[in-house]
Amino acid sequence: MTHISVLFILTAFKFVLSHGSCGIKTSIKCKIRSGPKQDRQCEGNIMNDDSSCRKVPVTFTFEVCIVNPSLRKVRFDRNGTQLKLRGKVVDNFNKSRLVKSVKCRSKIKNATINTCEQKANASFRVKRKTSRKTSCTSYSFFTITPISTCPCFNTERMGKAVKGILNDSKYLNKEFSCKKSDNDSMSLLYGNPYHWIRDQYSVRIDQCGDSDMRFNINPNQATECLRLLEGGCESIRNVLDSPDTEKCPCFNVHNLVEAVKKIRLITLPPESDICSISDDITTINLPAIETQGIEQTKRYAAHIEEQSGTCMTGDEVTKITSDEASYCLSLMEDACNELKY
């Protein structure tokens, strides 16, 4: 009979094949040998969090124990019992008989883990002779992968940016955003649609960006930054491309941003009220404005009734649903509020 258990802990992977009729159990443990995290488990404590690669001193402990109370001794198959670290055999493991009074035997191996390496593997196979012709095996496998972080942004900050873009409080620059280049660089360029305060998350192979700040990064950090950016961009695409996403059939926030930008370039009369807004906000009208040699702005309008509504770009009127009209009005209200200041 064979017992198999699999355990995932953060970035550590452990596989154990043991117990059952074999009566023995193998295990591999890893602890940090020195530094600020001395004596802590390797799992979750080896961080790839700066632009340089560091070597973290660790100790691997390979152990085999008798777990069957009726088993008095263990005879090792010398050729079938083997310890490995990064694919290389660890020598000097005592393969003499293990007796019940001792119960366990271990081998300690000091090593270093480079924070930039993809993973560090260790394995321990113990083959026990059960008779002259038969044997059984206990096997353990252990993998440590340094945890990579992106110094420019994290999941929470990316989520806030995506939320702002999707509810139109942030302007997404589609020309420069969410386009992955051949060298795995990508940007998410966004900002306040009316005040032109620009924010940007970006990554390339050796650098990431948060607005105007730049940080040098290592390849593993670049991979994590790219993963976060790809996830954010995928969320944006999934919502914006969905047929259920609120849209105004006549105009969008980008059209109104351009209109406000042009109107701000002209000198308006004192107390001028460019936007015509009904008291109950069922109608908003932004007329076409002559901008003194600059291209004339288009007229934008929206009106809502109980069961339907209309919107307008220039002289073209479109019949729309009440939900669409409500969304058009919300966009126009934001634009008109900007023109008050």
Image (cartoon, grey):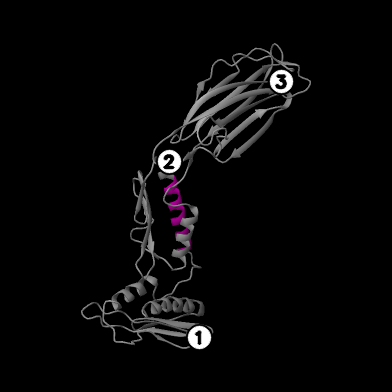
Range of the magenta residues? 224-240
Compared with residue 72, is residue 146 higher up or lower down, i.e. above or below?
A: below
Amino acid type at mark 1: Glu
Q: Is residue 241 visible?
A: no
Q: Is the C-beta separation of discs 2 and 3 under 8 Å?
A: no
Residue 18 position within the rendered picture, expressed as x and y whole percent measured from the top left? 67, 27
Q: Which residue is located at x 71 percent, y 13 percent?
A: 131
Which residue matches tag 3? 103
Amino acid type at mark 2: Asn
Q: Which residue is located at x 53 percent, y 85 percent?
A: 306
Q: Which residue is located at x 36 percent, y 65 percent?
A: 197
Looking at the rendered structure, the secondary structure element under dot 2 is helix
Q: CA distance from mark 1 to mark 3?
A: 83 Å
Label 2 Cα neighbours within 10 Å, binned few <14 / some 14-19 / many ≥20: many
235 or 93, nearer to the observer: 93
Residue 173 position within the rendered picture, expressed as x and y whole percent measured from the top left? 36, 62
Which residue matches tag 1? 305
Residue 299 position within the rendered picture, expressed as x and y whole percent measured from the top left? 34, 82
Which residue matches tag 2? 220
